[in-house]
Amino acid sequence: MYTEIPSGLSSEQAAICSEVHRFGAEVLRPASLRLDRLRAEEVVAKGSPLWDVFRAWYGLGNHAASLPECYGGLEFDPATQHGVFEEMGWAAADLAISLGVSSLPFQMTALVAQMTDNQALVDEIVVPFVEDRDARHIGCWAITEPGHGSDTLGVGRSEFRDPKAAGSCQVRRDGSDLIVTGQKSAWVSNGTIATHALLFATMEAGRGMAGGAVIVVPLDLPGVKRGAALEKHGQRALNQGEIFFDGVRVPGHYLLADPDMYPVALEMTLSQANTGMGVIFTGLARAAFEEALSYARERVQGGKPIAEHQLVQSKLASGHDRPVGARGCGGARPRHHRQGQLHGDRVRRGERRRPGPRGGRPRPGDPGGEAAPRRPGVADRGRRQRVPRLGGRAADRRGLCALRRLGRCARTS
């Protein structure tokens, strides 16, 4: 982290982030460089440095950072989670994504278990993951299909409810069980190494993509097959690959969201995933700036280091400011949430912000009459760019609403 910039983190939060930074520098980055030189099949082979990384991360208990304390998780607050994943992105974005998505099925399962008092989910899925210190439980998010990419994410669009756009991976009820048939694409992160999938599949094709369902699927069940690990130009330490389901029978209580709850679960998961990616690549941007600054101090042209040339200084300043701005948009500073919470309280009470002059001029609706339209200044742009943090109580507007709606659905079902 840029220690000269106040982060708003407590000493405990800062200590956690510093420890993850050290882990990133000593474990993640060296391993990522080694894995980058290997073929995709070698990355996931027995004895690969990838498994040392997973075991080290799980050994610290950090894989359960976002799971509730009542199940043995660490339950890091949103600001701490932001700092942790920024540091991981700084070290190695590919491994940060792999380690981050490894907990996703277990997070969603824990959330639903809390809302529905489903103790079987806790005992069979959540607790074994939390207690794991050898990386024997690895998750993936199985949503994209060979014929459906952004189609799967179009909540609110008319085509999302079009039966012609229904997903090809289908799930149906068979007594008390669920039967899954279909394929997920080669872009599933951790696809060929995961032990559990957070599967998004179509249950009611007549409702299009809106007729989906969310299931946690152990990938050692009969009928599950994997494709080859995907070869890529970049992020080579991030395993990705296809998953095939051939009449896979899944216990019915592993259904986390039915078609009525599906759009809510999708919005919530997408909000979390998108924010996580933004945070990870904020860290990557920091790393890029540090490399550029180091090179600019060493490279000499015109009789002096290029860092002393004005144009290069301008570029370095921009490279410094952008990740700092991205961190602010991600909401690393807790005070943004408090401001939004206070405003939300006023709105719920039916209160309006107290009108008053700005710069001596009345606002529209003030007793002094109508004010001339004022061009937005820098301060206004800054206010509009403030984005609430995602995760937990500090979810963005869409993610928070989705969480509340999911809770209501769970309580009434």
Image (cartoon, rainbow, N blue to C red):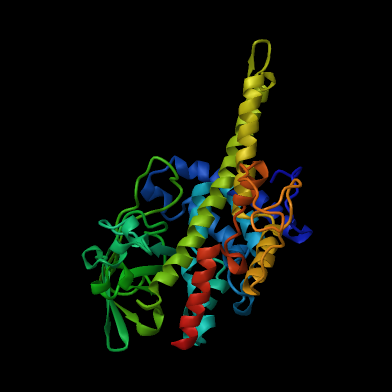
The answer to which of 309 and 71 lies nearer the viewer is 309
User: Which residue lies most toward the right here?
Assistant: 11
The answer to which of 1 and 246 lies nearer the viewer is 1
The answer to which of 375 and 173 lies nearer the viewer is 375
The mark tally for this picture is: 0
User: In this view of the protein, can residue 91 be seen by the observer?
Assistant: no
Instruction: Tell whether 121 sits left or right of 355.
Output: left
User: Which residue lies most toward the top here?
Assistant: 303
Quadrant of res 76: bottom right
Q: Residue at x 34, y 56 (%)?
A: 150
Whether 244 is drawn above or below 236: the answer is below
Q: Residue at x 47, y 45 (%)?
A: 35
The answer to which of 225 and 175 lies nearer the viewer is 175
Q: Residue at x 37, y 78 (%)?
A: 260
Instruction: Tell whether 297 sits left or right of 211.
Output: right
Q: Residue at x 27, y 65 (%)?
A: 167
Q: From the image, which quarter does the C terminus lie in?
A: bottom left
Residue 142 location in percent, x, y?
37, 63
Whether 124 is drawn above or below 147: the answer is below
Quadrant of res 258: bottom left
Whether 274 is drawn above or below 204: the answer is above
Instruction: Tell whether 6 sits left or right of 235.
Output: right
Residue 62 location in percent, x, y?
61, 63
User: In this view of the protein, can residue 214 be seen by the observer?
Assistant: yes
Residue 230 location in percent, x, y?
34, 49
Residue 91 location in percent, x, y?
59, 46
Quadrant of res 10: bottom right
User: Which residue lies most toward the left here?
Assistant: 164
Instruction: Tell whether 311 sits left or right of 187.
Output: right
